[in-house]
Image: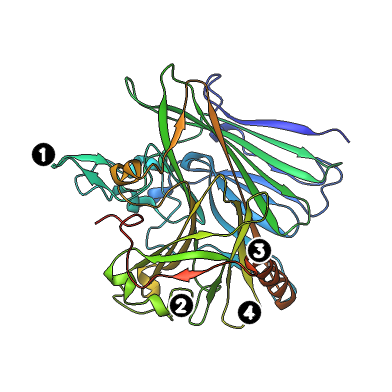
Amino acid sequence: MPARTWTLVDQASGLNPLSQQLSITDRDVPGLGKASVLTRVWSGGLADGVLSVEVNNGKLSFDVLPTRGMSLWRAILATAEGPLVLGWKSPNRGPVHPAFVDLGEPSGLGWLDGFDELLVRCGLESNGAPEFDDETNRLKYPLHGRIGNRPAHHVTLSIDPDAGEIKLVGVVEETRFHFLKLRLTSTITTKIGSSAVSVHDEVLNFSATPATMQMLYHVNFGLPLLDGGSRVVAPVKNVVPRNARAASGIKSWDSYSAPEPGFEEQVYFTDLHGTDDGTTRAMLKNAHATRGVSVVYNTRQLPCFSIWKDTAAEADGYVTGLEPGTNYPNPRSFETAKERVVKLAPGQSQAFDLTLEAHGSAAEVSAAEAEVARIGANRPSEVHPQPLAEWCAP
């Protein structure tokens, strides 16, 4: 059967997602089997007006949020032992519509008001800590940038039952008159019956003048996968604590404690070994190594990898972030000085690829761990006890 395509959002034609809720099953597209796609527009609270697209490939289901920059909100893997939920429980009652997120508020931390996704992009102008003008103390760059709070203006859904593939394509722009003009085209793909979802992003500078950009994928996990005794497994070259707080926990940089009220976050900057083509893998596994999830990406596109540990009480947001990026999430000016920005000529684009693979059994966790070991075998690895000036902003 030939592939079919639906337009879900099209600003140019005024297509309103409120007017055409879709529910696509095997009855509509023979060959889907247990797979399905459902669109919904949230009503009430901070989620009012958020469009979500729930893709269920028959084994893995996940929600995409075109209203929030094509973020992945949550995912659930069906297993013989029961569902494996990927994501975390934020104190924000989300998904939060960007209209309720003031990125320009004076502290520079307004981004946190909407933060509750499994995967949210940070960028595109900047992706790190907030930065202020030295003379006026006015905000120059807000925390983690703007792209995660920009709605897509064009979204299509394609289903190819012969290829066994479901694909969403969304276009999001980060622009300001007289300033940046960047266009993100995100293609989110899954195979029917698989345990994985893949993201292929292309960022285009559609200005007539050169531009620079940053990208960081903030991929977040909480209970039940994250718990006391959970570990990160990755083929690290270097591990560097961001600050003195992180340095105090350097001996346990790759392991997690149970929820602890009042815990102060710790961040570790790393770079990972990759295969000959740059492919690498970082996995979070539970304490018993019976369930896990891998973040698979390319070190040539995303050379930096940050581990964010925020194991506070569950009510305050017990979570960790595995974060591939073009740079480390320091202030933009620091990363520019260290030449960790992507330069784009007029009309030039840069591609980024990332895959989330869920592991629903001990055998799958073991296989992923073996792949990490293969990538890192007989290659140098160093854990630095203190921050490095080249990596960490003062």
Q: Quadrant of the C terminus?
A: bottom left
Which residue is the site of mark 3? 375
Q: Residue at x 64, y 74 (%)?
A: 291
108 relative position to 255: left or right: left
Image vertical order of residue 350 relative to residue 331, above or below:
above
Image vertical order of residue 321 relative to residue 179, above or below:
below
Question: Callout 4 environment at 10 Å: few (<14), some (14 to 19), or many (20+)?
Answer: some
Which residue is the site of mark 2? 256
The mark found on residue 289 in the picture is: 4
**Nearer the observer, disc 3 or disc 1?**
3
Q: Nearer the viewer, residue 381 or 156?
A: 381
Which residue is the site of mark 1? 135
> Of the residues shown, which amino acid type is indicated by label 2?
Tyr
Q: Residue at x 32, y 78 (%)?
A: 261
N-term mark: 3 or 1: 1
Specify the quadrant of the image occupied by residue 48. Answer: top left
249 relative position to 29: left or right: left
> Of the residues shown, which amino acid type is indicated by label 3?
Ile
N-term mark: 1 or 4: 1
Disc 3 from disc 1: Cα separation: 47 Å
